Every structure is written in C-alpha cells, then in structure tokens.
Amino acid sequence: MKTTATKSQVQQAIDNVNKKHGYKIEFNRADQSGKWFNFTIKSKSGIPGARISHSGRNLACASWHAHGYLFDELLEINPDAVIHSNGLMIDSNGGNWIDKNVGPTCSPAYFSELSIL
C-alpha cells in the first residue's frame, strides 16, 4: 500500500485500531519514496486481526477488517490522505470496504469471510 499520510499518522492509526479492536497489527514494511509512504501490515497468526486462507489455514497476515479499520482511522486522522491498496484508490470520498473473492473458482471465499474477529 502507499499513502500521502506520514509514517507517524499511519502508526497512530495502527495504535488506535489495536486499542479499539484488541488487534496486534504492526508494520511488515515501512519506507518513504518521495511523497508516498509505502507500507504493509501484518498480524501474528490465529489471533483477532489476522486472517485465514480459503482452505482454513491460519496466516500471519492482517485481515480484511484490520485493513478497513486502519483506512477508516487514517482518514479520520488525515482526511486529505490518499491511500492506494489492492489496485484501488481510497480517500475520504470512499473506496474502502470493497470485498473481493480470493478463493478458487470451485470454492469462492471473500476477504471479509476470512477475518479472525
């Protein structure tokens, strides 16, 4: 993902999400490239804020809900921020909470169904 928000604003949004939802998400990648702050987030597997694969395996990845809550928090902290994630532009005008099928054709599974809440 990349955003026009600062690293400290993204960190504050992560801290807010962790506190509000009992998650333990953190940066997996965090670097600055010009005006863009590039980052990915992760979570320990098998806990709230993480996700499972379409086959049911626990993953050390942040869930769809964790990403959505993070984007909401970040846009509350910096309403002018622009976020690019998963091929979508997310800003205060919308683009957040768009679900996507990530399962095989024979067994569809949506990101929202794979979150550990």
Image (cartoon, rainbow, N blue to C red):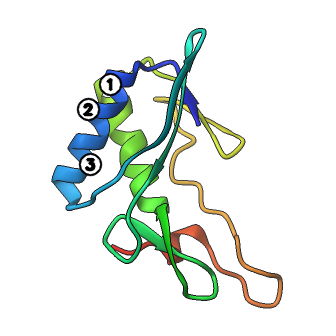
The amino acid marked with disc number 3 is: Val
Three-letter code, disc 1:
Gln
What secondary structure is marked by label 2? helix
Q: Is residue 65 visible?
A: yes
Q: Residues within 10 Å of mark 3 (few under 14, many from 20)?
A: many
Task: Residue under label 1, please give it.
Answer: 9
Q: Quadrant of the N terminus?
A: top right
Q: Label 3 to label 2, Cα distance in Å?
A: 9 Å
Tell me the number on the disc at residue 53: none
Measured from the top left, where is residue 99 in percent x and y?
60, 62
| Residue 90 in the figure: left or right of residue 115 | right
- Residue type pointed to by label 2: Gln
Q: Secondary structure at mark 1?
A: helix
Q: Which residue is mark 2?
A: 12
Image quadrant containing the C terminus: bottom left
Instruction: Give the vertical position of 17 relative to 99 (above or below).
Output: above
The residue indicated by pointer 3 is: 17
Which residue is painted at 83% across and 83% down in the image? 105
Are dots 2 and 1 in contact, CB under 8 Å?
A: yes
- Is residue 91 depicted above or below 72 in this figure? above
Badge count: 3
Q: What percent of the width, then of the height, locates residue 42? A: 45, 54
